[in-house]
Structures are given as C-alpha cells and as structure tokens.
Image (spheres, coloured by chain):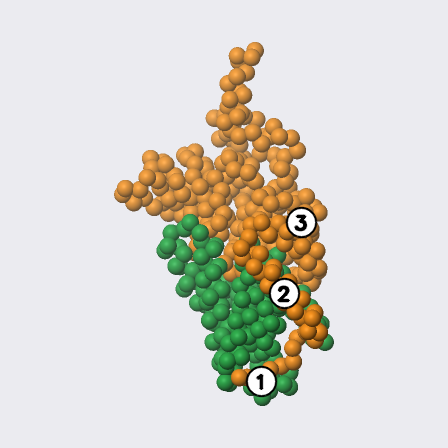
Amino acid sequence: MKTGLFVGCILLLVPLQTTVLGSISPFGIRPDLCLIAACLIGFLTGQVQGLIMGFFLGFVQDLFSASDLWLNTITKSGVGFFAGLIARNLANAASHSAFLVVAVFSVFSGVVFMVSSRVGMDIGDVLLGFPSILLPQALFDGLVAIAAYWVATRWTPEASSF
Amino acid sequence: MIGRVRPLFLWSASTRRLVVGMVIIALVLLFLLPRQTQFLLQQVGKPVADVVSVPLEMMADVDRGVRNWWNQYIALQGIYEQNRDLQVKVQNLEGELNQLREQALASQRLTALLDFQEESAMTTLAARVIGRSASNWYHGVVLNKGEDDGVAVEMGVVTPAGIVGYIVKVASSTSIALLITDPNVAVTGLIQRTRDEGIVQGTAQGFVRMKYIPPLAAVKEGDTVVTSGLTGGFPRGLLIGQVLTVGEREGDLFQTAHVAPVVDFGKLEEVLIVLPPPSSESTESIGNILTSQEKKPKDS
C-alpha cells in the first residue's frame, strides 16, 4: 500500500503538473506539486523519507523540465530532508505550520532557480522574478499544502493526534 | 516533537541504510560534478521518462478532452469551432504571405547569389504539445516526439505562423522545447524591411525583445522580424513577430526593440520540429554562399 502510494506519487504528480495544472494556473503560476509532496512527506514521516521521496520526485521533474543541472533533484531532496528535521523539533504541528514550512521552502527553492535560470542577465530582470513568480508561487504552494495536509492527516489515523 | 504517520517504506534497516547511502552519494556527485553526471543521469532517466510519459499522455488526452468539451458545449459551440478554423487559416496565410514576401525580397536582392527556394525548403516533423515544462522558471513545452522519431537537442520548433523555440531535452518518446519567450533562448533575427540584424531573446517577463540592432537602423513600430538563418535550427525567413516599440537611449551603442511574437504560446497544440536538411550544402551560411558565388567567374 505504502509502496504503491510512493510509486503513484512519482508517476502521477509530474504528469499532473505538466498537463492539468497548465490549464488552471492563475496568472500563469502553477503550484510545485513535487515540492509540496516532498516537503509534506518529510514533515509528516521524517527526514529520511523526505530525502528519498524528494530525490525521486525531483529526478522525474527534472526529466520533464527545461532546467538543467538537475536542480530539482537536489532542491527537492534538501527540502524533504530539512522539512523532516524541522518537524522533529516542532512541539505542535498544524496546517499553518505546514503552510509556513512549504512557503519558506518554496521561496528557498525559487531563489535557487531564479539565480540559475537568470545567469548573465540584468539584476533588474533577475529581481523581477520575486514579485512575478517566486512570491505568488510560495503563496500558492502554501495554500495547496494546507489542503494536502488536511487530506493526509485525515487519511492516516496516526496523524490525527497532531 | 510531533506525532508521525507510519513510514512510507517498510524496509529492513540494512536496505534502508543502503538506499539512503546511495541517494546521498548521488546527491553529492550531482552537487560536485553537475555537468559530468548530467549525461549519466539522462541515460538513467530515459526509461523512467518513458514510463512517466504513459500517464502523462493519458492525462494530456483527458485534459484536452475536458477542454474541448468545455469549449464546444459550455462556451458557444459553433462560434468556437469557426473561430478556431479561421484563426488557423489566418495564421497559415500570414505564414505563407511572409514566406512569399521574404522570397520576393531575396529574389530581388540576391537572385544571382542564392537559390532561395532551396534554402527555405525544410524538412519537418509534426509533434503534439502534451504538457508544459514542470517548472515555472522556464517557459517550455513537452512534445510527444523524441529520440526514436529522430528528434535531437537544438532542433528548431515552429508553427506555420512562425517560430516557437528549440529542443533542449530529449527522451525516447518525448522532448522538451524551450520557447522564445524564455530568457535563455536567443535567435538571430532580421528586420525584414531594413535588413538589419539583431539577437531576438526572451525576457524575464515572458516577452520577446530584439537586441543589438545597429544604432542607425531605421526600425519602426510594426516592422516584421524574421529569422536570419545564421544560427542553427531555423532556416531563413521564418516569422518571429512584429516590432512593438523601439527603445533608444542616448549613449547606447545599439537599439533594442520589443517584439510581439506571432505565435500564441498559450494555445500551442501542434508544432513542427525542423529536422536538419539531408545534405550539408543547404546549411551553408550566406557568407559561404557569397564566397562560392564570387569564385565562380574565376573558375570559369
């Protein structure tokens, strides 16, 4: 069951991101489903699970992204791992914690992408990524994370004590 | 400390250590040697991409079906179809008109030097857009043709209306094309009326601009920008867009023009991938052609 969920996540999240979300992206911004998944898995199940899932999700995302250098593999692994570490040290976790953690990691990941995708450009063009992509996406990711967190904690009885 | 759900993977301790170790080694290698490991991971990724492309194509079909159903039955059935047909027809005619205009100009100026008909003839492969790049930071599309169909990196992608971008990543059955609205794409362009060249590049805002236009070039709003054919991937004379504004600041060495692309990237459904010409002769640059033409009288 768990392995099926793991494989299903990897096989379906990226296709969902590249097809359906393309049609329903407000202001051209789509939530990064792989980042949200890696982050929440780390947050809910621990840093090792977050690291492994982040690695595979990022790897598949890289295959269907125009970015190079395997940035998604590295950033998603890091996001899953550090989300798990943060959750270990939290006294109480709730949907607003998930929102904050996902939004912060979305900003972190966005900065990495912004710098790498805008190499050699004017600083004005680079910084334009903040209001046009980075911040709206962080907000969007955070909101989707709240919904995903709510679903995850109701599906898994162990998490209902959060 | 918060409560936890059960672990995702119920592995033994040794398997778990092995997997984590391999992931960490892979990450360290990726981090330290990104360029060197890229080829290796691309090879590893090809079968994975093939597997993922199955649900991707299925979802693309479902997405397309839902969108078609919505457009045809919810949003004014007949008008939508008529409008779409007319738009396609207008785009085709614009493309043809532009090709003809370009041919006429080239014939007047370069008939003795170039066989323009031969140069503009291109071999193409039709592909369907099955998705958008999985990252907001790159303006790209996923195409349903890949290495098995003869697609390779740096091939140009066009529609009958004009150029779209070029291929940056290829798997066995899919490929990723970066659009000309992406800042990482640059194509040599030509102002059709004045014959001034420049570099057409995407911007961070998702627009297109033409840089390095000579300072004395009389470029004006509405001028047509076409490919110059000097960079790989695109033959000469393909429509890129029309000049919206020309920015010229005092002290600037070159002019920059904002260009409105002719292709509506939000509604891309089918594209053509430009395959390399069968013989190397047709890839000669203008410089080479001029040189060979100049030599002819001496030879004879």
Residue located farthest toward the left when viewing the structure as drawn: B250
Give me the chain that's orange. Answer: B
Instruction: Assign the C terminus of chain B to one quadrant of the image.
Output: top right
Inspect the image, locate mark 3, and give the three-letter code of the amino acid beneath it: Gly
Q: Which residue does the image show at 28% across and 42% down from the upper left?
A: B251
Q: Residue A12: name its quadrant.
A: bottom right
Chain green in the figure, letter: A
The reply to whether dot 1 and dot 2 touch (C-beta < 8 Å) is: no
Question: How many angstroms separate mark 1 from mark 2 (CA)?
Answer: 26 Å
| Residue B132 in view, yes or no | no
Horizontal relation, residue A130 to residue B23: left or right: left
A60 lies left or right of B104:
right
Vertical arrangement, residue B296 with respect to residue B236, above or below: above
Question: Which residue occupies the foreground of this view, B242 or B81?
Answer: B242
| Three-letter residue code for mark 1 | Gly
Q: In the figure, is residue B65 to the left or right of A95? A: right
Q: Establish if B3 lies above or below B56.
A: below
Front-most of B133 and A19?
B133
What residue sits right under mark 2 in the picture?
B21
Q: Are marks 3 and 2 on the same chain?
A: yes
In the depicted structure, whether residue B275 falls above or below residue A135:
above
Q: Amino acid at mark 2?
A: Gly
**Residue under the image location 63 percent in, 44 percent down:** B152
**Dots 3 and 1 on the same chain:** yes
Marks 3 and 1 in Cβ contact (< 8 Å): no
In this figure, which residue is indicated by the disc labeled 3? B146
Q: Badge 1: how crowded within 10 Å, few (<14), some, or many (20+)?
A: some
Identify the mark nearer the N-term, 3 or 2: 2
The image's mark for residue B3 is 1
Camera-near label (1 vs 2) is 2
* Residue A155 x, y percent position in the rendering: 64, 82
Query: Residue B278: where, in percent of width, then height?
Result: 66, 33
